[in-house]
Image (cartoon, rainbow, N blue to C red):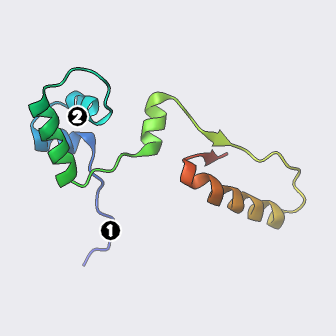
Amino acid sequence: MSKGKSKRATILDIAREADVSPATVSRVLSDSGYPVKEELCARVRKAAQKLNYKPNIFSQMQQRDRHHRAGPAQPVLCAACFRRGAEMCLERLRPHCVQLV
């Protein structure tokens, strides 16, 4: 019995399921304002729901070149103190999709 992670659905998976191009899927899911026929929108949304699609926020940030990063600006007193401080920062930044560098 395999305990591997199940693969996340991608735009390509949705495109195959809905029988549309990946560009159409992207336009529908991003609400880009680009005109897409309602029938195609419905197929894409149905496929996304069927495949339990969840957007990958980190991938979206890279695509849009909007990197949200923060770095500590404190002197290093000791390795243990720094590590605990970094862990606390990560805990608070993670829900906001900000990377600690």
Residue 76 percent across, percent down from the top left: 87, 54
Q: Nearer the viewer, mark 2 or mark 1?
A: 2
Residue 5 percent across, percent down from the top left: 33, 65
Q: Secondary structure at mark 1?
A: loop
- Sequence-wise, which precedes: disc 2 or disc 1? 1
Q: Nearer the viewer, residue 83 or 18?
A: 18
Residue 17 percent across, percent down from the top left: 12, 44
Q: Tag 1: residue type?
A: Gly
Quarter of the figure with the C terminus: top right
Which disc number belongs to residue 14?
none
Residue 81 percent across, percent down from the top left: 83, 64
Residue 6's quadrant in the figure? bottom left
Task: Count neighbours of disc 2 (C-alpha within 10 A) and say few if under 14, some if 14 to 19, many if 20 or more.
Answer: many
Look at mark 2 in the image and give the residue it sits on: 25
Question: Is 36 rendered above or below residue 2?
Answer: above
Name the residue rendered at 77%, 47% in the picture: 72
Asked whether disc 2 touches disc 1, contact meaning CB atoms under 8 Å apart, the reply is no
Report the side of 50 relative to 34 (left or right). left
Query: How many numbered marks does the figure carry?
Result: 2
Q: Tag 2: residue type?
A: Val
Report the side of 80 relative to 63 (left or right). right
Q: Secondary structure at mark 2?
A: helix
Look at mark 1 in the image and give the residue it sits on: 4
Question: Is 7 rendered above or below residue 59?
Answer: below
Task: Count neighbours of disc 1 (C-alpha within 10 A) and say few if under 14, some if 14 to 19, many if 20 or more.
Answer: few
Name the residue rendered at 36%, 46% in the picture: 55
Name the residue rendered at 43%, 31% in the picture: 63
Report the side of 93 relative to 57 (left or right). right
Quarter of the figure with the N terminus: bottom left
